[in-house]
């Protein structure tokens, strides 16, 4: 029985160390806290080159969205997310689009991913007259009407962050029909 328990614990611990979870972007009343992600096996120049390729493959018009490009140091991308966040009012789900900026800085073995929330829009392109700070009370607590807004916006941000991580760490895979 002790051998079985030891073997089970060994397998669980090894699985946890192999499947690295990256830090999550969190929205606060002051904005989004940047994350630093470890990628030990990659140099700053390798991360930078993969980031360049990721931008080319992720964005429809990569030349238009790439706003800063400092070789082996950082890139800045201005993007647009449809259905970026939502909330429910009177049983109806309202979703909003949003502009954002990401800045990714590179060091050997790690990168810093910063997400800056921009303007909100409703479908049809009309600007919304408020920003993410409206989600919060002065105390920092989330307003009752926006309890879905914060996690849905964090989901949008973290999907992009995870897409980047998976790309540079080689964890993306094409389906058979994609070749």
Image (tube, helix red, strand yellow):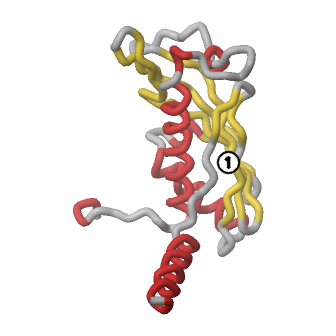
Residue at 48% x, 92% y is 3
Q: Residue furthest front?
A: 1
In the picture, measured across the screen, residue 49 lies left or right of residue 34, that is: left
179 over 56 or under it: above or below: below
Residue at 74% x, 14% y is 138
Residue at 54% x, 70% y is 16
Residue placed under numbered mark 1 in the picture: 113
The quadrant of the rendering that contains the N terminus is bottom left
Closer to us: 176 or 156:
156
114 over 11 or under it: above or below: above
Closer to us: 125 or 24:
24
Q: Position of residue 89 (x, y in %)?
A: 41, 11
Report how many numbered discs are placed on residues in the image: 1
Among the 4 quarters of the image, the one containing residue 99: top right
Q: Position of residue 155 (x, y in %)?
A: 50, 39
Closer to us: 1 or 88:
1
33 over 51 or under it: above or below: above
Identify the element where label 1 is drawn.
strand
Closer to us: 141 or 51:
141
The quadrant of the rendering that contains the C terminus is bottom left
Among the 4 quarters of the image, the one containing residue 48: bottom right
In the picture, measured across the screen, residue 109 lies left or right of residue 57, that is: right
Residue at 71% x, 54% y is 36
Q: Position of residue 114 (x, y in %)?
A: 69, 42
In the picture, measured across the screen, residue 6 lies left or right of residue 76, that is: left
Q: Position of residue 125 (x, y in %)?
A: 45, 14
In the picture, measured across the screen, residue 30 lies left or right of residue 5, that is: right
Q: Residues within 10 Å of mark 1 (few under 14, many from 20)?
A: many
């Amino acid at each position: 029985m002790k051998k079985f328990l030891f073997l089970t614990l060994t397998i669980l611990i090894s699985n946890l160390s192999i499947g690295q979870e990256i830090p999550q972007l969190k929205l606060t009343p002051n904005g989004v806290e940047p994350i630093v992600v470890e990628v030990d096996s990659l140099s700053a120049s390798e991360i930078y080159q993969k980031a360049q390729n990721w931008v080319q493959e992720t964005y429809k018009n990569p030349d238009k969205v790439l706003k800063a490009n400092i070789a082996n140091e950082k890139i800045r991308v201005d993007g647009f997310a449809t259905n970026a966040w939502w909330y429910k009012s009177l049983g109806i789900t309202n979703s909003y689009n949003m502009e954002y900026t990401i800045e990714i800085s590179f060091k050997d073995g790690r990168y810093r991913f910063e997400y800056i929330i921009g303007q909100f829009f409703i479908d049809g392109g009309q600007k919304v007259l408020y920003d993410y700070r409206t989600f919060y009370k002065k105390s920092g607590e989330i307003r009752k009407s926006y309890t879905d807004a914060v996690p849905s916006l964090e989901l949008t941000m973290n999907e992009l962050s995870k897409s980047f991580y998976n790309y540079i760490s080689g964890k993306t895979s094409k389906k058979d029909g994609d070749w």
